[in-house]
Amino acid sequence: MRKRLTDVRHGLVLAWVLACGLGGAAWAQDAADPAARPAEMEVRVAMRDGARLLTYVNLPAGEGPFPTVLVRTPYLLSIGPRHNPIMDAYLDAGYAVVWQLARGIGDNDGRYRFIADDRDDGYDCIAWIAAQPWSDGNVGMDHGSYNAMTQLQAASTAPPALKAIIPFVPSSHFFRETPYSGGIFMRYHMLNWHKLLRLRSFEETGVGFMDSSRVIDDPEWQRLLTSRPLIDSANGYLDGDELVQYRRFLEEPVMNSEYWRETMMMDEHYARVAIPVLLVSGNFDPTTGTLHAWRQLEANAPNPQNRKLLIGPWNHGGSYVGIPPAEGPYELDGAGVVDMSALRIAFFDRYLKGVPASVSLPQRVRVFVTGSNAWREFDSLPVPALARTPVYLASEGAANGVEGNGSLGFEPGSPAPADVTIADPSNPVVAITDLMAGVGEYSESHGNEAVLVYDSAALDEPLTVIGESQAVVHVSISTPDTDLVVNLHEVHPDGRAIRLGAGGGLRLRYHEGFDREVRLEPGRIYTVRIPLAYVGHTLAAGNVLRVTVSGTEFPMLDPNPNTGEPIATATRMQTSEIRIHHDSAYPSRVELPIVEL
């Protein structure tokens, strides 16, 4: 890459650890002494096909039987420090705690396949727990990220003993969040994530692992992130089941294949989740998977009165502990702190023990609004009766970079010609941020002429956005395929541009949906709709709302070769000329869920 990375956020490695559901690892040194607790039992639990999975059982003090909290995980690192303050709080509250390592991980039987076996294995593990003499037959599931996905998968099989789940920051739509973001493969994320499955300690890692600020200057990462064909890019870095799975993602480029139907939660799976669910995410997490799961449960699952959604001022890992992040551009007061141990125990006390909750549970939807630093509660999300407010892109024909003439307004119609930018896969726009949330300052990358920048006037009064926005872009390109990446930002008077949420992107071959690939006719104007990630934020009076559009965002999104060939096997690359049309006939815009507080 010709552009050197300079915008580096501290704490990136820790953010990645938490992002992958390894919450316990970060607090092991603060946990109660495991030696002071009853002995842990290590057993191999047989699944229906005979595969035996490593399972750890921790029992509370006193006479049983006990209700049980189950965590199912593919992470060897999280299996190591099973005692952490939250899990120990369960033991203190009279819950057994069980950890099970997924099949194919470590020395477990079977082959590792991304989430595909966690439905049946989850059911079998829950049935095994319910049959144990120390169990009272009531099981709940907890934990985050992949470990949240295992909860949804197990719940979709309706095990009789499973009474409630608490999924934190799950992925649930694999073409909108990971391994694909808007159909754009997340090469850097997937290389790191698959490597993480085999790690027993971070001493096994090398330069650039989980630290995207270092990847450009390292020759090995240059090869990993730029080599073609993409399907061979992990060779020599991953091996075994992880390499097979990495390649499998690329071999399945449309969502309606048998592979994705077996892997993803479909409508019929959500319809079987009749138990209480507490979904949790954070303002500084992409939230896309959490809110997709919420919408699917709302549309298909019974018993909505027992379903709750909590979004706080947390990143991917912070959602697990309920503590606002110490870093980042936002100053958060004590109002954002939630005692997640007490909330978890109260939720399970109600639904596993059948006793009154020890603390007040939130209403159906409770969200924290940064900027205002206040909690708000609603009956549902999207906020009832809320109509999105369009803000329209405009320019004098040159919105390139912060020195361009792009503008943003609440009225459509711009007589100027379209804005033009170039998507160059050999020289992409570089944006280094928190790996999961994308929180950070973008002032430098907005000086790149490959980024189209549209600024509103300074706001006369605060503007609050709660929910998922949508970009409606009228675009023509010079190639059969390229990508569009759209982001929202708040610009401060000193010029700092802070991204709001994780934005959104679309590989344009999916402009008719992720079920099929349709190449574009060069020069023809298409209307594409790009969902943007959740934002819960109040922009301050005097600040500016900014919309940016680009064709690349590296290293999080793998650049499109732009040739229209199959992404997995393409070796040739070319630049694509992108035209964003925004006149009265083609009113490109972003539709914002603006809320009056």
Image (cartoon, helix red, strand yellow):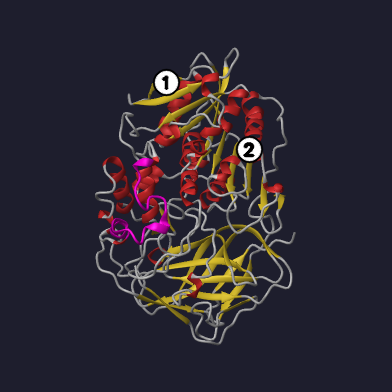
Taking the spot 47% from the left edge, 31% from the top edge, the residue there is 81
Q: Secondary structure at mark 1?
A: strand
Residue 181 screen position, x and y as percent: 44, 57
Q: Are marks 2 and 1 in contact (CB under 8 Å)?
A: no
N-terminal label among 2 and 1 = 1
Check if residue 208 falls in the magenta segment: yes
Q: Is residue 177 above or below residue 559?
A: above
Res 495 seen here: yes
Left or right position of 96 against 370: left
Front residue of 493 and 290: 493
Q: Amino acid at mark 2?
A: Met
Residue 473 screen position, x and y as percent: 50, 72
Q: Secondary structure at mark 2?
A: helix
Q: Which residues are magenta?
A: 203-225
Residue 327 screen position, x and y as percent: 58, 53
Q: Amino acid at mark 1?
A: Glu
Q: Residues within 10 Å of mark 1 (few under 14, many from 20)?
A: some
Q: Which residue is mark 2?
A: 340
Taking the spot 52% from the left edge, 29% from the top edge, the residue there is 83
